[in-house]
Amino acid sequence: MKKSCSKMKNQLLIIISTICIALFMNACATFKKPTTINEAPIKERALTKEANGIRASAAVVGDQEARQIFGIDLSRKKIQAVWIEIENNSDRPIILLSTAIDPEYIAPLEVAFYYHRAFASDANAALDEHLLNLNFPVRSSMKPGSRASGYIFTNWFKGIKVIDIDLLGNNFSQNFTFFAPNPDKMAESKAVIDRIETMFSDPELQKLESEGALREVLEQLPCCVSDKNGKTSAEPLNVVLIGEIYNWMSALVRRGYRYQELNPRSVFDRVQDIHTIKLSGGYLKGQEIIIRLWQTPIRYQSMPVWVGQTSTRLGGRFADTASAEVTLPMDPHVDEARDAFTQDIAYSQALIKIGYIKGSGLAQSTQTETSSKDYQYTTDGLRVVLVFAKRPASLEEIDFFNWKRLDDYR
């Protein structure tokens, strides 16, 4: 009996010692405010735009920079800080809408809470204060002649980050959109931007002015993408985007679309220029609409024209778990993805015109001969054409091309 009690005491001592060591290690890992903060590199590479007496600057904060500035490892929780500066030289007060930068942005105290440690109330309070002091003052209006700067905590993004800045005043709004490179992937990010901007020389451009000419050219675009071998006629090209990239990319971000590596598809003998997916949070995961886009040499009234493919995986939100880049097997009812994307993007307040043309997809009999089962689909053969402009544009302001009627194909 005495031996049993002695053994239990020894075990208890071991447990208590382990807990004490863990608490000591936890205390050692508590927050310590950085003695110096070097923001110069961030400000030097910040992108700047100006309009209506308002000057806006924005930059993505790298992971190592974040550790130096905030004293914590934001990347561990997939958090990415964005530096914003607004100089208001207009004649009206304005406020920054942080949800435009990221609809699921993280409040500073929410960030701090994740890095709190047990039995470290002073350090936790210091972290709270530090992040609040560095946060952009979103609760305060910017008076005429004033300047405000600070950080917004967003979801981590490895490539080029689309930073959408919306400023609101009395009967006034101003938008700035930036394509900000991740400093940890600077060369890669700049290469993507340079490739898109220099893809076509002026003599290569096909410049169109009339709706009739536009329709004729768009109907002659390839029907479908090809797989990585360039042989199989795969998913249908069922979307056309027309407008400056800042306008429609801003619309995609506003509706929750994010950059995502996707399995390669080929059009014009090259893989997709841009790929994105709509990711929804919440208790029930939303439908993940995927989009692959290719820039064309077509210009309609000076606006670039992009052709794309949109679809969803078979089973949608209830599909088996797969790597994020996997898009097969495809839901065969591809028109539902096309229509869902169109309706969704209409709420971005950047869409100004919609039209439908023929030219998308293959007849089902032809698919059976040329495509694998994973690629087969049913479609009405229509390709939606979406024209974008600077926001805001309400639903009632959306115009329509007098082309094919969707009702006639139901």
Image (cartoon, grey):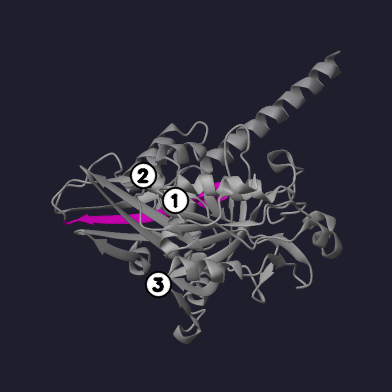
Q: Position of residue 391 (x, y in %)?
A: 35, 52
The span shown in magenta is 73-89
The location of residue 222, given as percent across then percent down, is 65, 69
Label 2 vs label 3, nearer the camera: 3
Indicate which disc, 1 or 3, sits on the residue closer to the N terminus: 1
Q: Is residue 81 magenta?
A: yes
Report the side of 137 relative to 163 (left or right): left
Distance Cα–Cα, label 1 vs label 3? 48 Å
Q: What residue sits right under mark 1 in the picture?
A: 71
The label shown at residue 130 is 2
The answer to whether residue 347 is left or right of residue 146 is: right
- Would you say residue 262 sits in the magenta stretch? no
Residue at the image position 31 percent from the left and 43 percent from the top: 138
Q: Are marks 1 and 2 in contact (CB under 8 Å)?
A: yes
Q: Earlier in the sequence, mark 2 or mark 3?
A: 2
Q: CA distance from mark 2 to mark 3?
A: 48 Å
Specify whether 3 is left or right of 223. right
The CA distance from mark 1 to mark 2 is 9 Å
Given the image, on which type of amino acid does mark 2 rest?
Answer: His
Residue 166 seen: yes
* Label located before the other in sequence (1 or 2): 1
Depth check, mark 1 against mark 3: the one in front is: 3
Amino acid type, callout 1 = Gly
Residue 302, label in figure: 3
Q: Secondary structure at mark 2?
A: helix
Element type at mark 1: loop
Secondary element at image label 3: loop
What x and y, as percent, mark residue 303? 42, 69
Closer to us: 146 or 216: 216
